[in-house]
Image (spheres, rainbow, N blue to C red):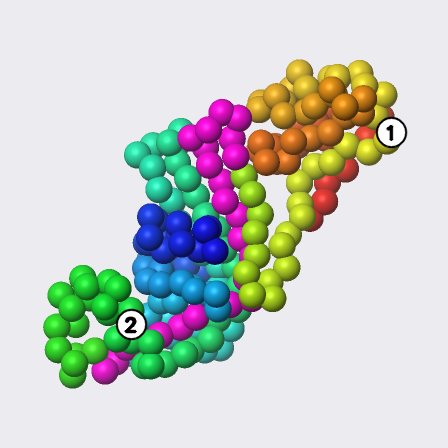
Amino acid sequence: MDYLKYLTKEIHSTVMATVDENALPVTCAIDIMDYDENGLYFLTARGKNFYARLKTGRYVSLTGMKGTDTLSCIAISVRGKVEEVGNDYLNRLFEKNSYMYEIYPTKESSTALTVFRIYDGCGEWFDLSKKPIDRESFSFGNGIKTVDGYYITDKCISCKKCIVVCPQRCIDFTSGYARIIQNSCLHCGNCFNICSEKAVVKRG
């Protein structure tokens, strides 16, 4: 819930991807206007092509970023199922996002709008403002938390070539065996490529 709250309150504006009738990706800027235990909420107009893609595709992915430059950036990416929940949520979103009254100033003008919810999703938090970087996977609803990245198996002979090429120095040998500190890993693959023993494996 903390990640959904941050996405809604601190980032708010995201780039959302859907797929068109030719199975080609299409992106658009979408504000995430609310969240709760059931997912994330946004709205759109029924006359837009975006609405048609949401109705036929049933899945979305999005990324939002906050920061003044790359090294101060926090990013959250989410993917999940999407469903139309209709006008029952419209007043709630307008009340929490008062700028919408500037765009649709009358009740009559807002009749084109409808609300969608992203549910059963998973995502990733990625914070470049920390050294080493901080990343974390999460899920909500019935979404399945992804487990990807690089892992070191028992084939490792502790030659430590991998730590020399690791940009975040996130390979730890202090426990008596080698392990990658996943929350600090860039997933660059340097360890995988340099390991002569094939002890590093990629998952996901």
Q: What is the x, y in percent for residue 2? A: 45, 51
Q: Is residue 25 visible?
A: no
Q: Residue at x 40, y 54 (%)?
A: 5
Please identify, in this view, whether the residue under mark 2 or under mark 1 is nearer the observer: 2
How much space separates mark 2 and mark 1, taking CA atoms?
55 Å
Q: What is the x, y in percent for residue 24? A: 49, 63
Q: Is residue 101 left or right of residue 112?
A: left
Vertically, is 80 above or below 171? below
Q: What is the x, y in percent for residue 27? A: 40, 59
Q: How many marks?
A: 2
Q: Residue at x 35, y 42 (%)?
A: 66
**Kind of residue indicated by mark 2:** Arg
Q: Quadrant of residue 188?
A: top right
Kindly identify which residue carries mark 1.
Answer: 155
Q: Quadrant of residue 111?
A: bottom left
Asked whether 129 falls inside the magenta stretch, the response is yes
Neighbours of disc 1 within 10 Å: few (<14), some (14-19), many (20+) = few
Q: Is residue 29 left or right of residue 79?
A: left
Please tell me whether the stretch drawn in magenta is mainly helix, strand or loop: strand
Q: Earlier in the sequence, mark 2 or mark 1?
A: 2
